[in-house]
Every structure is written in structure tokens, then in C-alpha cells.
Amino acid sequence: MNAEHACATTRSPQRQRGIAAVEFAIVFPLFFMVFYAIVTYGLIFIAQQSITMAAAEGARAALRYAATDALRTTNARNAALGNGSTAYWLNGRLSFSGTIAATCPYNGGAVTGRCYTATVTYANYGQNPLVPLLLGGLMRVAVPTQLSSTAVVQLD
């Protein structure tokens, strides 16, 4: 009877008390890290897509008639980073660079005419991320240091 009594006490609800809390404590960090990675990388992909679209908008705006090249660059900057831009939600974190080259970078430079290159950059993403980085410097290894995109259009 003692053996039966010992076996019954090991399966009693008293011996199982708190096991759910222990299982939760073991499994929760894993699920949280997976969720955190999905959110972090999802925002990185959205930001990169917005930056790519902003560079394309800037390059297309450079195609519009402008009396001077400086005005052309102003139009491109306003289209890439202005209120109507797809990257406006990243306002203050982006920089714009617009250059005009005498030859186009594609086709080995054999294309005659000028080309406009619009570049939008989110510099120092590792220092200024959209989602705070957990684990400090350890997470900086897993995220990009910079997000950037370039678009080129032929002017003439």
C-alpha cells in the first residue's frame, strides 16, 4: 500500500503546482525574440522600400523642365523628401544627393546625353534605429548601419 500511496502523490495536483509558470518562463523569451525580429526587420524592409521609392520619385522629378540644374535638384529633393513623398514618415532622418553627369553610368558610358542620379540615404541606422535595439551592441551586428537607394534617369 505504501507503493500505491507514493505513486499517487507524485501525480497529485499539489506536485504540478507552478509548472505552467516555469514553462512560460522558458518559452516566452523565445517567442518574444521571434516577434521582436519580425517587427524589427519588417520596419527595416518598409523603410528601405520607402527610401527606394523616394529616390525614384526624386529622379522622375528631375526629368521635369527646370531653368537651371540647381532648380532641377531642388525639385528632385522636394519630390524625394517633401510632404507627398513615400519616405516622408522618415522625415529628419534622411539625406538627399542629386548629381548630373555628362555621361550615363549604364551602357558603358556610350549613351550620349546627361544623366541625373538621385540618392536618398538613411545614415547611421545602427545608431538611430526605428525600433530600439535589445541587447545593446549585440543587436547592432544584426541590423544594417545604413539604408540607401539610388535612381538614375537620362535627361537629354
Image: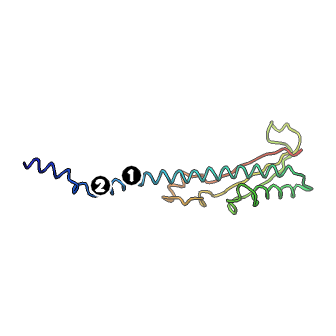
Quadrant in the picture for the C terminus: top right
Q: Quadrant of residue 76?
A: bottom right
Disc 1 or disc 2, which is closer to the eye? 2
Residue at point 34% right, 53% down?
23
Please tell me which of labels 1 and 2 falls first in the chain: 2
| x then y, percent, for residue 84 | 76, 58
Taking the view exactly as shown, the residue that stands out farthest to the left is 1
Please give left or right for residue 18 compared with residue 12 in the image: right
Disc tally is 2
Q: Amino acid at mark 2?
A: Ile
Which residue position is annotated with label 1? 27
| x then y, percent, for residue 6 | 13, 50
| x then y, percent, for residue 77 | 79, 57
Which residue position is annotated with label 2? 19
Colouring method of the image: rainbow
Observer-nearest of 74 and 110: 74
- Classify mark 1: residues with Cα within 10 Å, few (<14), some (14-19) or many (20+): few
Question: Element type at marker 1?
Answer: helix
The numbered mark at residue 37 is none
Q: Amino acid at mark 1?
A: Val
Residue at point 46% right, 54% down?
32
| x then y, percent, for residue 88 | 71, 59
Question: Element type at marker 2?
Answer: helix
Residue at point 80% right, 36% down?
107
Residue at point 92% right, 56% down?
67
Taking the view exactly as shown, the residue that stands out farthest to the bottom is 92
